[in-house]
Structures are given as structure tokens and as C-alpha cells.
Image: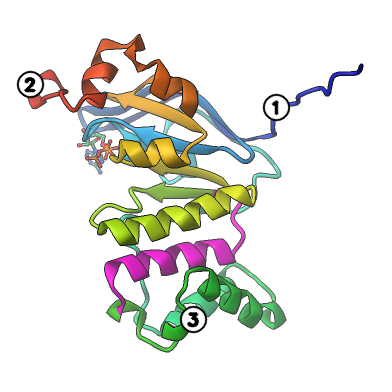
Amino acid sequence: MIAEEKQSPAMLLSLEGAGLRFGNVQALSDVTMQVRQGEFIALIGANGSGKTSLLQALHGLLPLSGRRLVAADCGRQVMVFQRPFMLRLSVWRNLLLALWLAGVPRPLRAARASEALQRAGLSSLRDRPARALSGGQQQRLALARAWAVRPGVLFLDEPTANLDPSAKNEIEAMLAGFMAEGMTLIMSTHNLGQAKRLASRVIYLDRGKIRADLPSAVFFKEHALDARLDLFLKGELTWDLL
Ligand SMILES: Nc1ncnc2c1ncn2[C@@H]1O[C@H](COP(=O)(O)OP(=O)(O)OP(=O)(O)O)[C@@H](O)[C@H]1O
């Protein structure tokens, strides 16, 4: 019998010995990690541990020490924020504009926008002003807009913060669908259940350093590896310990 050779998926992005300072705050120190095709990485950690900084560093928005490498076939990188930015236009025009900015040829834009709206369950709201949508609907539109431009890597900064449980479920369902299609996702979250439900890999940050970087199934089984991580997961990492 010939065993199938398992090849690791292609590397899309990596940081080597990356550091980031804001004045006298060391937001990230000595971060080395790779992002591979098709992964769904959850970044977890206490407030101020560096999750947003790491997302922005990976996305290339912040100047770093160390090295950041982007593979030639990484594709477009898109970031969705906790509070999505909507233009003062209809839902439909927000989508069309994103497709235009992404260089999608005109004849493809309407079909792509319709498909994205359908995916987000927003077809009936296409002519509404985007800013008049609820928080959950705006976040679904932000995800639809990101999906429409076919990102190689999608960054998500606490995409369900401030949403009610049903809106959270809808967002999670969309993200699970993206992953099933092979999209590469990196998300910061304070919701450990969400990390467990969605992520294939979990990175735990503590004071700007990566303290654990494990497949999700291993992470949630073996978190006793680190006493502070254990406290964090139990919700007992108090301010005096931070
Ligand atoms: N623009 C900035 N100027 C100064 N300090 C900053 C800036 N952005 C982040 N920091 C600091 O860097 C550290 C890491 O912040 P970061 O926002 O990355 O953490 P986080 O894990 O995303 O936090 P939270 O969970 O509260 O969103 C914190 O000490 C924060 O105060």
C-alpha cells in the first residue's frame, strides 16, 4: 500500500522575530509565526495582550522590527473591524463600490454583489442606507463585502463584539461557510467558545508574546501547559496579574 503523502498547505504570510512598540509600550515582542492556506486562526488573550496589534502587523498596517514575508500567491488581504465602516450609501452601492475598488471588471460586479447579499441574507435590504442597518446586519454586510472581493486572507478584529447571541450565530455561520470554501481567516476574539467552534488553530498572546500556538483541538485539551493561560481560560487572570 502506498500511503498518501501529506503536504503542508502553502505558507501565505509570516512574521519572524517581529516586534512593535508604541512609545514605551512593547505591544509585540519576538513574534514568529506563519499563516498557511485554509487555516482559521483565532487570536486570544487578555485585554491589551496584543491581538489587534498582531492582526494589524500581519496585515502590514504597522511598521515592525523583524521580518514580515508575504508569499507571491497570498492574494488580496482584507480586514473587517469590530465596528464596520459603511459609506453613506445604500447596501447595494457599498458592495458595488468595494468591487470597483478591488478592480473587479464591471460586467461581473452586479452578479457578484447579488451573490454576496444573498449569502449574508440581506437581499431584501439592498436599497436601504447601509448606515441604517442594525449592528448585526452591518457586520454581515461587511463580511459579504469582504467575501465579494475574494480575499486570499481575511482578518477579523473581534467581529462579534457587541452583537446579540442571534446576530453572533449568523456571523459565525458565515465565517464557517468561508472556511469550508477554503478561505484563510485570522480572527481576534474574547469569546473562547467561538474560538473553539470556528478555529483550526489557536494562538494565545500574553503581554505581546505568543505563549501558545496549537491546533484548536490540542489547545482546548491541553491548556494546562501554562499557568497564566490556565488562569486566563478560567477567567481568573485579574488586573493585578496582567
Ligand atoms: N496606537 C497606540 N498607541 C499607543 N499604545 C497602543 C496603541 N495601540 C495599542 N497600544 C497598546 O499596545 C498594547 C496592545 O494593544 P492591542 O490593542 O493590540 O491589544 P488587544 O489584545 O487587541 O486588546 P483588546 O482585547 O483590549 O482589544 C496595549 O498595551 C495597548 O495599550
Q: Give the extent of the magenta segment.
A: 133-153
- Mark 1 or mark 3, earlier in chain: 1
Pinpoint residue 149: horizontal percent, then vertical percent: 59, 64
- Mark 2 or mark 1, earlier in chain: 1
Residue 62 inside the magenta-drawn segment: no
**As shown in the figure, which amino acid type bears the numbered disc 2?**
Asp
| Image quarter hosting the N terminus | top right
Q: Residue furthest front?
A: 1
Which residue is at 70% across, 42% downward? 72
| Tag 2 residue | 240
Left or right side of 213 for 159: left
- Single out the mark in the foreground, 2 or 3: 3
| Tag 1 residue | 8
Q: Main secondary structure of the magenta part?
A: helix
Along the line of sight, the residue nearer the viewer: 42 or 224: 224
Q: Residue furthest bottom?
A: 127
- Pointer 3 local density, CA inside 10 Å: few below 14, some 14–19, many at least 20: some
Along the line of sight, the residue nearer the viewer: 29 or 187: 187
- Pointer 1 local density, CA inside 10 Å: few below 14, some 14–19, many at least 20: few
Q: Quadrant of residue 148?
A: bottom right
What is the CA distance from the residue labelled 2 to the residue labelled 3?
49 Å
Along the line of sight, the residue nearer the viewer: 223 or 22: 223
Pinpoint residue 217: horizontal percent, then vertical percent: 48, 25
**As shown in the figure, which amino acid type bears the numbered disc 1?**
Ser
